[in-house]
Image: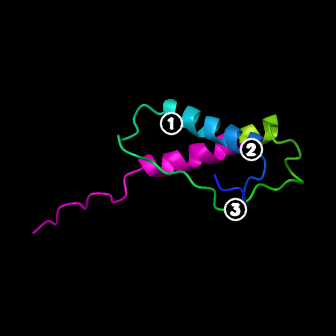
Amino acid sequence: MPKRHARRSVTRQLLKRQIRAAFAERPGMPPGLWVVRLRSPFDRQKFPSAASDALRQAARAELAQLLDRALKPRHEPRPEAVA
């Protein structure tokens, strides 16, 4: 987690714990190395506490969405052409 998106170490550690927990809850994840990266900072006005329940729930909800997208097949098989 870059400091520019999560200034406090408490916040970065909370996010790391949430990521580990989200992966542990998904036994169907394909093996391999996964990289989870923050694309934008968390709004300190919305989450004033670095380890608040609101931040924990927001992170978990966003991780669930991302993991659902990662597990969804990318391409649907094409139906066979009838000749």
Q: CA distance from mark 1 to mark 3?
A: 21 Å
Q: Residue furthest left?
A: 83
User: Dot 1 surroundings within 10 Å: few (below 14), some, or many (20 or more)?
Assistant: some
**Along the horizontal axis of the image, is 46 left or right of 13?**
right
- The residue lying at 70 percent from left, 38 percent from top is 14
Task: Identify the residue position indicated by label 2 in the image.
Answer: 9
Task: Provide the secondary structure element on which disc 1 rests.
Answer: helix
**Magenta stretch containing residue 67, yes or no?**
yes
Mark 1 residue type: Phe
- Residue 40 is labelled as 3
Task: Identify the residue position indicated by label 1 in the image.
Answer: 23
- Relative to 32, residue 7 above or below: below
**Magenta stretch containing residue 42, yes or no?**
no
Q: Quadrant of the C terminus?
A: bottom left
- The residue lying at 77 percent from left, 54 percent from top is 42
- Relative to 21, residue 1 above or below: below
**Residues shaded magenta:** 58-83
User: Dot 3 surroundings within 10 Å: few (below 14), some, or many (20 or more)?
Assistant: few
Indicate which label's residue lies in the foreground, 2 or 3: 2
Mark 2 residue type: Ser
Indicate which label's residue lies in the foreground, 1 or 2: 2
Task: Provide the secondary structure element on which disc 2 rests.
Answer: helix
Q: CA distance from mark 1 to mark 2?
A: 21 Å
Q: Are marks 1 and 3 in contact (CB under 8 Å)?
A: no
- Which mark sits nearer the N-terminus, 1 or 3? 1
